[in-house]
Image (cartoon, rainbow, N blue to C red):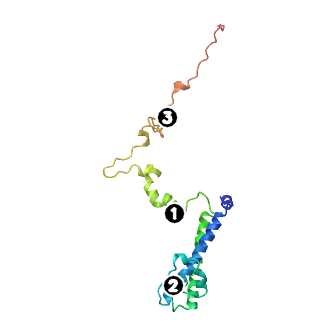
């Protein structure tokens, strides 16, 4: 199992490219979320950029222009508040991306165990509630003969049609067993044909 866990699986360029694209989109959205929070702190209200200026307004925001990419001018937002808000939002987003990346690597990365159930799946299949529901199958000698109102008890396996033990006679496990002597009697040798008798 340990050898399988450390065997690397082939990775292609799609996975790193998708991770880089996701990180870039999150960073761009973090800039606009930080600008909106800075506007809300300054009393202007939360502002969001238009779709066509999602990328073109980044230069103006980095130049301390809080109204870049907005349909209405924004006043009262200082450059320090704008920069602080953007930095805090970006740090939070980077932390969330790190947690997400760690979970993805553990779940599907090169070191992940392939074909093994997760803890939630194992709990669903082998948990206490599952064992209680399947107790008649797991221990039929203890729970299969219990009766409820209007329900008959389960017949023994030997009475079920088609069961290997159906129709067999039980051999007593205690007491002496009768020995059929005629089966163990010594067979007398018979003379061969053509032999001479005295």
- Mark 2 or mark 1, which is nearer to you? 2
Position above or below: 9 against 136: below
Residue 98 appears in the figure = no
**Residue that badge 2 annotates:** 37
Q: Quadrant of the N terminus?
A: bottom right
Q: Is residue 19 left or right of residue 174?
A: right
Q: Is residue 97 left or right of residue 138?
A: right
Tell me the element at label 3: loop
The front one of 127 and 170 is 127
Quadrant location of residue 115?
A: bottom right
Position above or below: 50 against 10: below
Where is residue 85? Give x, y as percent: 55, 86
Residue 184 appears in the figure = yes
Quadrant location of residue 28?
A: bottom right
Residue drawn at (56%, 79%) of the image: 30
The front one of 145 and 194 is 145
> Which is more N-terminal, label 3 or label 1?
1
Where is residue 168? Give x, y as percent: 46, 35
Cα distance in 3D space between marks 3 and 2: 93 Å
Residue drawn at (45%, 60%) of the image: 129
Residue drawn at (66%, 58%) of the image: 4
> Which is more N-terminal, label 2 or label 3?
2
Position above or below: 44 against 56: below
**Residue that badge 1 annotates:** 120
Residue drawn at (47%, 52%) of the image: 138
Tell me the element at label 1: helix
Where is residue 50? Give x, y as percent: 51, 78
Cα distance in 3D space between marks 2 and 1: 38 Å
**Residue that badge 3 annotates:** 177
């Amino acid at each position: 199992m340990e050898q399988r866990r450390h065997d690397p699986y082939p990775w292609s360029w799609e996975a790193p490219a998708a991770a880089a694209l996701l990180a870039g989109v999150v960073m761009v959205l973090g800039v606009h979320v930080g600008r909106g929070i800075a506007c809300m702190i300054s009393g202007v209200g939360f502002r969001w950029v238009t779709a066509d200026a999602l990328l073109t307004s980044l230069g103006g925001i980095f130049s301390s222009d809080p109204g870049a990419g907005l349909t209405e001018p924004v006043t009262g937002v200082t450059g320090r508040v704008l920069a602080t808000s953007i930095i805090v939002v970006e740090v939070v987003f980077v932390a969330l991306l790190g947690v997400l990346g760690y979970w993805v690597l553990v779940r599907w990365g090169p070191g992940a165990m392939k074909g093994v159930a997760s803890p939630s799946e194992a709990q669903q299949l082998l948990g206490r509630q599952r064992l209680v529901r399947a107790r008649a199958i797991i221990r039929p000698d203890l729970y299969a003969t219990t009766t409820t109102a209007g329900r008959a008890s389960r017949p023994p396996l030997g009475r079920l049609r088609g069961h290997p033990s159906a129709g067999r006679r039980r051999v007593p496990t205690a007491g002496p067993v009768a020995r059929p002597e005629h089966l163990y009697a010594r067979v007398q040798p018979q003379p061969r044909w053509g032999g001479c008798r005295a």
